[in-house]
Image (cartoon, coloured by chain):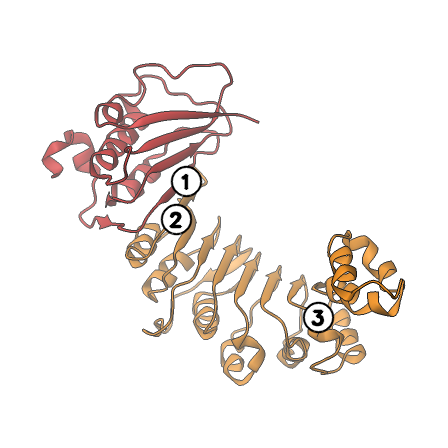
Chain colours: A orange, B red
């Protein structure tokens, strides 16, 4: 087993189903790292306790297991107003590129925290599903992520209302998103993002949203793909 | 340019129309219904997309095309005709009807203005 070149071992592991990865990590030393990398490529937190445990089990270690995580999902996780826990959970994920938030409240304090944390600068994909928040907070979070490429917002269960108390505007040097996807029931977020002059090469939009025409107009110069649905 | 279009569509064209010079792909998912007035309004805000070679229109139910020169399909037809006239793509503009019933031909009278403008209709049957 140990005579196999590492590239071949990696190729085998890359074709294993996820359910086999913990077993494969025990086959031999050569199998361990790649198996763990794939098994932990995407993790999901379903409670604040799970977040706490992760932070205790895998403290910040740039070369360690936490660095294998590229995608993290927070689902129905309430931080009881403790943004520090949320921040710490993200901070030790030094390879994180995709953040998927489902069924959570986005606190108004988050945008102010983002510039202080390096991890947010690496986020290229942000999915906000079933969230509750205010328009100002969501738009501010989106515009705070300098390298964002994919933004998906769907079915805000409550909120995403209220006036846009300030008018954050996309910095002029910012490159367009690769994909902006706005699904049903997201309140006035489409119009708010259009007012912030966020642009994208690919728009995927529910036609019943407010601001569809404005979003198309904002991106008119670079828009390559347009999907309209939900009639 | 708006004078070339029937009054009904001209009335629906918003004051601010937009040119989409880089648009190559347009997918429209109708769900299980006809094109809605809201959809027509959004489409009419697009004045031209010269790089657009095909438009996919999906329908999960059945295409209820009826008398396509009238009603929601009539509005869609007139907008598609405008897109077909303005396309710069070699071979012209195609509409692909996704979810079309297997074995059912597309009737001659469907999307007449689009056809007259040089557009082609293709079908992709339901899986």
The C terminus of chain B, quarter of image: top right
| Pointer 2 and pointer 1 on the same chain | no
Residue displayed at 47% across by 53% down = A181
Residue displayed at 35% across by 74% down = A171
- Using the numbered discs, state the Cα–Cα distance from disc 2 to disc 1 in whole angstroms: 8 Å
The N terminus of chain B, quarter of image: top left
| Pointer 3 and pointer 1 on the same chain | no
Residue B16 position within the rendered picture, expressed as x and y whole percent measured from the top left: 20, 50
* Element type at mark 3: helix
Between residues B54 and A108, which one lies in front from this camera angle?
B54
Disc 2: CA contacts within 10 A as few (<14), some (14-19) or many (>=20): some
- The residue labelled by disc 1 is B27
Res. B53 image quadrant: top left
Residue A20 position within the rendered picture, expressed as x and y whole percent measured from the top left: 83, 54
- The residue labelled by disc 2 is A225
- The residue labelled by disc 3 is A68
């Amino acid at each position: 087993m140990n005579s196999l070149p590492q590239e071949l071992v990696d190729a085998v592991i890359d074709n294993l189903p996820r359910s086999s990865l913990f077993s494969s990590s025990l086959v031999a030393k050569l199998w361990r790292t790649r198996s763990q990398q794939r098994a932990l490529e995407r993790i999901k937190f379903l409670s604040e306790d799970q977040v706490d445990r992760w932070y205790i089990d895998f403290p910040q270690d740039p070369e360690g297991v936490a660095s294998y995580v590229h995608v993290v999902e927070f689902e129905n996780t309430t931080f009881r107003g403790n943004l520090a826990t949320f921040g710490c959970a993200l901070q030790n994920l030094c390879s994180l590129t995709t953040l998927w938030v489902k069924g959570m409240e986005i606190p108004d304090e988050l945008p102010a925290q983002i510039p202080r944390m390096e991890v947010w600068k690496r986020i290229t994909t942000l999915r906000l599903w079933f969230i509750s928040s205010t328009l100002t907070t969501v738009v501010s979070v989106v515009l705070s992520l300098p390298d964002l490429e994919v933004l998906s917002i769907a079915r805000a269960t409550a909120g995403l209302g209220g006036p846009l108390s300030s008018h954050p505007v996309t910095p002029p040097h910012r490159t367009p998103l690769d994909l902006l996807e706005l699904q049903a029931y997201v309140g006035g977020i489409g119009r708010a993002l259009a007012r912030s002059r966020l642009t994208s090469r690919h728009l995927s939009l529910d036609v019943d949203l407010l601001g569809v025409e404005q979003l198309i107009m904002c991106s008119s110069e670079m828009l390559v793909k347009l999907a309209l649905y939900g009639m | 340019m708006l004078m070339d279009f029937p009054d009904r569509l001209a009335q629906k064209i918003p004051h601010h129309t937009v040119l989409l010079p880089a648009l190559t792909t347009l997918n429209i998912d109708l769900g299980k219904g006809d094109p809605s007035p809201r959809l027509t309004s959004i489409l009419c805000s697009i004045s031209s997309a010269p790089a657009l070679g095909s438009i996919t229109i999906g329908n999960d139910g059945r295409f209820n095309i009826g008398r396509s020169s009238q009603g929601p399909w009539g509005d869609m037809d007139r907008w598609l005709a405008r897109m077909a006239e303005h396309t710069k793509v070699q071979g012209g503009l195609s509409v692909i009807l996704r979810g079309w019933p297997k074995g059912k031909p597309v009737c001659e009278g469907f999307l007449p203005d689009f056809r007259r403008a040089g557009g082609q209709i293709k079908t992709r049957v339901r899986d």
